Amino acid sequence: MFIKYSLRIIALSFTLLLISGCSQSNQYGGGGYEDPCETLRNNYWSEYQAYKDARAANNGVEDAAVMSHYYASGEYAIQFSESDCEAQGYSLETEESGDSSQSENEIVDIPESDIVYEITDRLNNNSSLGWSIDQANDITGSNVIGVTLSDDGQCGVWIFNSVMDIMRAYDNGLFQYSSNWYGIDEQTQYGIMLITEDQNNQCADDLIRTVGWDSLE
């Protein structure tokens, strides 16, 4: 009698253990774990690709619906930065998944040391004004990789590795006391900031044409 009772206890305990194990397996193994930084990175590129696709479908017009994707990608970039994802080895600089619009807007791979010269040359080729590189050292701490100036003294073009670097500069309180606009150079995907007091001047128009923006509105 004692043996039968003990066997029943052991069998019951084993059954409960199996049930508990299955429950935990469903709880922790059902959906799979995705790293928050990877999620932010994927969301950033998803919204940025949606912006490019919507812009192309809208004949290049950046209306509110198109720009909503651009602003959403910017929000994900800010969250990516605030989560210290770069310190964990993640980057927004390259996209591992295929870019459906790359054949339309081919990204040019240019060394960082040459990018300022390349953009300055494009400005000179697209402008009746002259443009030249500012050789002064950056003292703002903004991580700008180069500055080019229009010869009429009305525009400064600041070139960054990415738009995220520009957002970091804003977060650090830089450029808040100047009239400026920023976005992406469609050809190289580098971050571009235009600093000018008059968005309707010739040098501003030159930049808009050169980097593929529609307007400064």
Image (cartoon, rainbow, N blue to C red):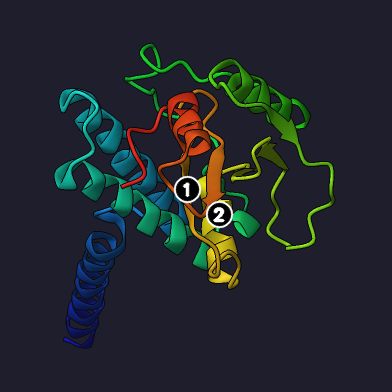
Compared to residue 3, the image places residue 72 above or below, namely above
Compared to residue 186, the image places residue 104 above or below, namely above
Kindly indicate the quadrant of the structure image that contains residue 116: top right
| Mark 2–mark 1 CB contact (< 8 Å) | yes
**Element type at marker 2?**
helix
**Element type at marker 1?**
strand
Relative to residue 170, is residue 1 drawn left or right? left
Relative to residue 133, is residue 80 drawn left or right? left
Q: Which mark is residue 166?
A: 2
Q: What residue is at 36 percent from the left and 13 percent from the top? A: 104
The outermost residue toward the top is 103
Q: Which mark is residue 92?
A: none
Residue 3, percent across and down? 24, 81
Kindly indicate the quadrant of the structure image that contains residue 93: top right
* Nearest-to-viewer mark from 2 and 1: 1
Q: What residue is at 58 percent from the left and 73 percent from the top? A: 173
Residue that carries the numbered disc 1 in the rendered image: 182
